[in-house]
Image: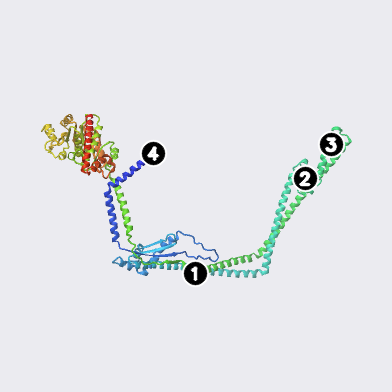
């Protein structure tokens, strides 16, 4: 787990550097957008007219009192998150603001303020006012702030105070209207209750007259009713108790009848709580047992006819008869009691039925009167409740109507303009400018499908990058071997030598997908690096469409390759010498219109073989491979092909197509050269070539003394490097 952490950190750093690289490369776009947004924001901010603000703070409550209501507990006003939001909408409603517009003639004010040619309609004035109005809740309170903006600070104060006053009056009018409507409804209900109660009282008087019922009869009937109900309930309780006892006795009899004599003897003494029912039985049971024991003991020694045996047997029979008579008496007594309980139940049931019938008969006689009396009591309760509600609503309205809306802090004239907020606008302009600029830079980068990094090349083409060439590279013949750009070509030369499969591969062509990618300059400087290492090098300008090598060498192009291939000149006459002893040059020559395909001729192939034998390395310049077929012909005839790709110039599909064309004709593509890299902007390429460049740049500013001291060391190092390069060339 720990081993993976450094790798993750490396990947994160790489991604950050990629983003930073995009920002550095697109800094011109970012800076342009940033300045445009900031300047536009600043200019617009200073051109906007200034406005003042005035704020009124009001306290708003619901339409009820905080005091205890009549007939109920105290009203608890809990926090209602929707109440203040609702009031915000009411303050900004047309009902309130139209009244403000009318009271202050805001249509004329806005027409004059904004220099309008036509008179504003109320709905148009409302829109202007809404645009200049803000309603918010004061933080951590239940207060509402009404803020009005206007170019005239006194007018802003007047409008803010008028909105608060109109809203307050509107709330009070609404509360009064609701109270009036509710009070009228309650008053009508009270009149109806009074009328119904009066009708009920007349009906009661008529019933008393028809039934000849007096107050004494009503009181006596009420008391008798209570006593009789209690008496009936007592009889019902007694009936329930007797029923339980009768059921228990009946069950006991059924269980005792199912027992034999011996079982009955054991069960009877324990079956009754009343000991008097079984008195004497225990002594009889003991006497019987003793006689049976004596009889059993004497029967062993005495015969059955012995007088003592006969006496004991006679006495035993007498005891058993007594026990049987006693048991039978107990059972008979239980049966008699069970029948008595049954008859008692029947008698109680009959008595209860009789009492209930008599009670119902008496109640039926007074039922109409009592029903009417109950209805009258109900109507009287309704009348009293409605009357109480009327008094309650009157008191509550008087207590709460003056506290619905209260102005805490009236509006005042502003001391300084609040619109536009110059600091805020410019700050937002800076932030938005940066965000838009960076976003646009990343968007352009996303749309740009050109080659940007070595990874792009190797991932798209599956070919190694052999060299990275910086920007603003000229001819190394003019810059000299100590040029800060030469090291990039030395790296390229080394990589090419190591990429060769055999030592006899010494013909090289450099191709590109499109024009202007630095193909010819790269080829010439690479040939110069090989020649500076004392290798015999020939540069052949085989770009017959747009030859350019002669311009770099500042030589004539009147006689060259075309003259040799057409048989007009021998080879030695068309090859030119250069200022570098080991570097020769074969110009393209003038191309007749009738000889467009001479590069694919047999003589051209023979020339390539001849030059391979005469020189250590031969470099063939070519036109863009996507434009004409000459580059494809050269790629198929030479030993090695380099593809030059200019940094951020052509889309990747074009470079991929160029590579495919090389492979299609059988060319040996040994690698890719990235050209025109801005080392100052893209740090990813610094370690490929920038270090050497920085080294020379820093030492170029040293004083003459340091230069002289270091000159010998540099010369020695250069000599060692050249010796090493010669050894490499001999090896390859």
Residue in the foreground of this view, choosing between 250 and 351: 250
Q: Which residue is mark 1?
A: 398
N-terminal of the pair, mark 2 or mark 1, is 2
Which label lies toward us, 2 or 1? 1
Mark 1 surroundings: few (<14), some (14-19) or many (≥20) residues within 10 A: few
In percent of width and height, residue 343 lies at: 74, 53
Q: Secondary structure at mark 4?
A: helix
Q: Which residue is mark 3?
A: 295
Residue in the foreground of this view, choosing between 71 and 686: 686
N-terminal of the pair, mark 1 or mark 4, is 4
N-terminal of the pair, mark 3 or mark 2, is 2
Given contact means CB atoms under 8 Å apart, are the residues at marks 4 and 3 in contact? no
Mark 2 surroundings: few (<14), some (14-19) or many (≥20) residues within 10 A: some
In percent of width and height, residue 672 lies at: 25, 37
For this orientation, the residue located farthest to the left is 568
Q: Is residue 630 visible?
A: no
State the CA–CA distance, disc 3 to disc 1. Answer: 112 Å
State the CA–CA distance, disc 1 to disc 4. Answer: 79 Å
State the CA–CA distance, disc 4 to disc 3. Answer: 110 Å
Q: Secondary structure at mark 1?
A: helix
Location of the N terminus (image quadrant): top left
Residue 4's label in the rendered image is: 4
N-terminal of the pair, mark 2 or mark 4, is 4
Mark 3 surroundings: few (<14), some (14-19) or many (≥20) residues within 10 A: many
Q: Secondary structure at mark 3?
A: helix
Given contact means CB atoms under 8 Å apart, are the residues at marks 1 and 4 in contact? no
State the CA–CA distance, disc 3 to disc 2. Answer: 26 Å
Q: Which residue is mark 2?
A: 269
Above or below: residue 219 compared with residue 660: below
Q: Secondary structure at mark 2?
A: helix
């Amino acid at each position: 787990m720990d081993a993976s952490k450094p790798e993750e950190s490396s990947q994160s750093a790489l991604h950050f550097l990629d983003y930073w690289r995009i920002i550095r490369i697109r800094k011109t776009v970012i800076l342009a957008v940033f300045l445009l947004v900031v300047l536009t924001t600043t200019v617009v901010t200073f051109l906007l007219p200034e406005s003042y603000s005035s704020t009124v703070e009001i306290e708003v409550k619901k339409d009820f009192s905080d005091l205890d209501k009549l007939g109920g507990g105290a009203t608890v006003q809990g926090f209602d998150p929707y109440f203040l939001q609702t009031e915000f909408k009411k303050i900004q409603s047309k009902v309130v603001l139209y009244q403000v517009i009318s009271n202050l003639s805001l249509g004329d004010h806005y027409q004059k303020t904004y220099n309008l040619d036509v008179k504003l309609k109320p709905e148009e004035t409302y829109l202007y006012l809404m645009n200049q109005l803000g309603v918010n809740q004061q933080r951590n309170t239940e207060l509402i702030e009404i803020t009005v903006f206007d170019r005239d600070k006194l007018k802003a104060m007047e409008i803010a105070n008028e909105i608060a006053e109109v809203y307050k009056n509107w709330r009070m009018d609404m509360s009064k209207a609701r109270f009036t409507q509710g009070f009228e409804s309650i008053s009508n209900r009270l009149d109806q209750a009074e009328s119904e109660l009066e009708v009920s009282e007349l009906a009661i008087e008529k019933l008393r007259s028809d039934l000849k019922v007096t107050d004494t009869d009503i009181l006596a009937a009420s008391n008798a009713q209570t006593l009789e109900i209690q008496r009936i309930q007592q009889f019902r309780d007694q009936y329930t108790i007797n029923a339980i006892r009768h059921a228990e006795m009946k069950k006991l009899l059924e269980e005792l009848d199912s027992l034999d004599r011996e079982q009955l003897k054991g069960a009877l003494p324990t079956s009754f709580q009343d000991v008097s029912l079984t008195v004497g039985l225990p002594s009889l049971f003991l006497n019987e047992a003793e006689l049976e024991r004596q009889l059993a003991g004497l029967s062993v020694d005495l015969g059955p006819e012995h007088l003592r045996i006969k006496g004991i047997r006679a006495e035993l029979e007498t005891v058993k008869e007594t026990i049987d008579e006693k048991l039978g008496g107990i059972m008979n007594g239980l049966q008699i009691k069970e029948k008595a309980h049954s008859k008692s139940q029947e008698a109680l049931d009959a008595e209860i039925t009789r009492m209930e019938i008599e009670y119902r008969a008496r109640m039926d006689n007074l039922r109409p009167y009592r029903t009417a009396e109950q209805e009258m009591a109900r109507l009287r309760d309704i009348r009293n409740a409605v009357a109480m509600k009327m008094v309650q609503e009157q008191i509550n309205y008087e207590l709460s109507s003056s506290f619905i809306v209260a102005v805490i802090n009236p509006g005042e004239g502003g001391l300084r303009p609040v619109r536009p907020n110059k600091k805020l606008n410019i700050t937002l302009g800076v932030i938005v400018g940066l965000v838009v600029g960076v976003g646009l830079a990343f968007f352009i980068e996303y749309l740009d499908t050109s080659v940007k990094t070595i990874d792009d090349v190797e991932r798209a083409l599956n070919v190694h990058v052999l060299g990275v060439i910086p920007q603003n590279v000229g001819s190394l013949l003019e810059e000299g071997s100590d040029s800060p750009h030469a090291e990039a070509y030395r790296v390229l030369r080394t990589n090419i030598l190591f990429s060769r499969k055999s030592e006899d591969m010494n013909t090289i062509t450099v191709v590109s997908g499109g024009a202007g990618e630095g193909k010819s300059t790269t080829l010439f400087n690479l040939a110069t690096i090989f020649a500076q290492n004392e290798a015999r090098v020939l540069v052949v300008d085989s770009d017959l469409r747009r030859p350019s090598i002669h311009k770099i060498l500042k030589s004539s192009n009147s006689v060259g390759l075309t003259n040799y291939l057409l048989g007009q000149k021998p080879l030695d006459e068309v090859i030119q010498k250069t200022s570098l002893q080991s570097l020769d040059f074969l110009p393209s020559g003038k191309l007749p219109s009738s000889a467009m395909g001479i590069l694919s001729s047999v003589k051209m192939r023979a020339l390539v073989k001849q030059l391979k034998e005469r020189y250590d390395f031969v470099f063939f310049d070519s036109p863009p491979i996507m434009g004409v077929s000459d580059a494809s012909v050269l790629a198929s005839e030479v030993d090695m092909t380099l593809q030059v790709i200019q940094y951020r110039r052509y889309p990747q599909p074009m470079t991929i197509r160029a590579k495919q064309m090389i492979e299609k004709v059988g060319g040996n593509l040994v690698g890719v050269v990235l050209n025109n890299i801005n080392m100052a902007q893209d740090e990813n390429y610094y370690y490929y070539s920038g270090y050497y460049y920085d080294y020379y740049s820093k030492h170029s500013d040293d004083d003459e003394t340091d230069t002289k001291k270091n000159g010998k060391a540099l010369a020695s190092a250069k000599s060692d490097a050249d010796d090493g390069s010669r050894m490499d060339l001999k090896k390859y």
